[in-house]
């Protein structure tokens, strides 16, 4: 097991699959395979269940996420990708995990009981003013919210919480924005919308891992 790249700290590979070092050895989150390598345990990171893993395998140029980062995760759901983010930021990092569904948040709470660097927050990501007193400034904003105004939601939260020079990543689902247009048209439109409010560092189509999805890595201007 070797570090993938200095551009992706905390991400490991055996030349075929991606892994993160398990923050809670012996504990699975979504049935992923656990692998022992030396004195450490690693969790297999499934790109078909995590858009962030898919983006890395599609050779996105960088991530902007590292050990010690404070993260705002919008659309955390039951914690699949959030748990790998938890591994990457480690004990010195922290993840504010937002989701609007009480049902999925119950599963996320169980993950957070074991992972002390994640806090679950029941809130609407479209209204960051409602949780502004529960989230500090962050180094990284991650969004996986399949709504028509998903880009607006992302930019709004970056404005509220992302520190100058901090990074953000958004997984865009084309069909949630407009089913009448081709995904490539949607992604071009999203790129233009993002560039009006933040610097876009890189972007990738996520096929074949995710159909009609694209992933954008951004950086807030200093």
Image: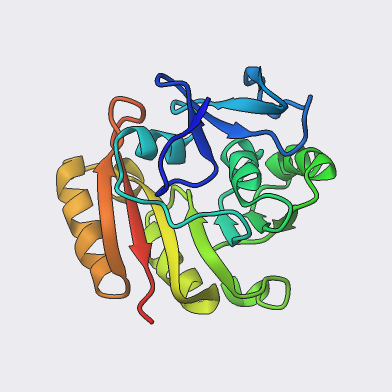
Q: Quadrant of residue 84?
A: top right
Indicate left or right for 174 with 10 as reference. Answer: left
Residue 20, percent across and down? 58, 34
Could you say where residue 1 lies in the image, as x and y percent from the top left?
Answer: 53, 24
Number of numbered discs? 0
Up-down relation of residue 167 to residue 55 (above or below) = below
Q: Residue at x 49, y 30 (%)?
A: 2
The answer to whether residue 69 is seen in the rendering is yes
| Whole-percent x, y for residue 75 in the image | 56, 50
Q: Is residue 146 rendered to the left or right of residue 10?
A: left
Say whether residue 57 is left or right of residue 196: right
Q: Residue at x 55, y 43 (%)?
A: 10
Q: How is the image coloured?
A: rainbow
The relative height of residue 162 versus residue 109 in the rendered view (above or below) is below
Up-down relation of residue 46 to residue 175 (above or below):
above
Image-quadrant location for residue 21:
top right
Residue 33 spot, x, y in % from top left: 63, 17
**Closer-to-camera residue (34/119):** 34
Residue located 40% across and 41% down the image: 5
Give the residue at the far right of this rendering: 113
């Amino acid at each position: 097991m070797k570090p993938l790249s200095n551009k992706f700290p905390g991400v490991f590979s055996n030349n075929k699959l991606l892994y993160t070092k398990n923050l809670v050895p012996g504990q699975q989150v979504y049935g992923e395979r656990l692998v022992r390598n030396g004195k450490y345990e690693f969790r297999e990171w499934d790109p078909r269940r995590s858009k962030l893993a898919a983006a890395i395998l599609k050779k996105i140029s960088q991530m902007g996420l590292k050990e010690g980062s404070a993260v705002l995760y919008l659309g955390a759901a039951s914690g699949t990708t959030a748990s790998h983010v938890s591994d990457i930021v480690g004990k010195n990092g922290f993840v504010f995990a937002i989701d609007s569904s009480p049902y999925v948040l119950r599963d996320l709470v169980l993950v957070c009981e074991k992972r002390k660097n994640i806090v679950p927050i029941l809130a609407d990501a479209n209204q960051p003013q409602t949780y502004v007193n529960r989230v500090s400034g962050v180094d990284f904003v991650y969004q996986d919210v399949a709504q028509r105004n998903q880009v607006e939601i992302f930019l709004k939260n970056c404005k509220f919480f992302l520190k100058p020079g901090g990074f953000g990543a958004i997984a865009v689902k084309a069909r949630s924005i407009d089913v009448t247009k081709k995904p490539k048209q949607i992604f071009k439109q999203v790129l233009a919308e993002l560039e009006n409010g933040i610097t876009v560092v890189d972007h990738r189509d996520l096929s074949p891992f995710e159909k009609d999805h694209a992933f954008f890595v951004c950086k807030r201007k200093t």
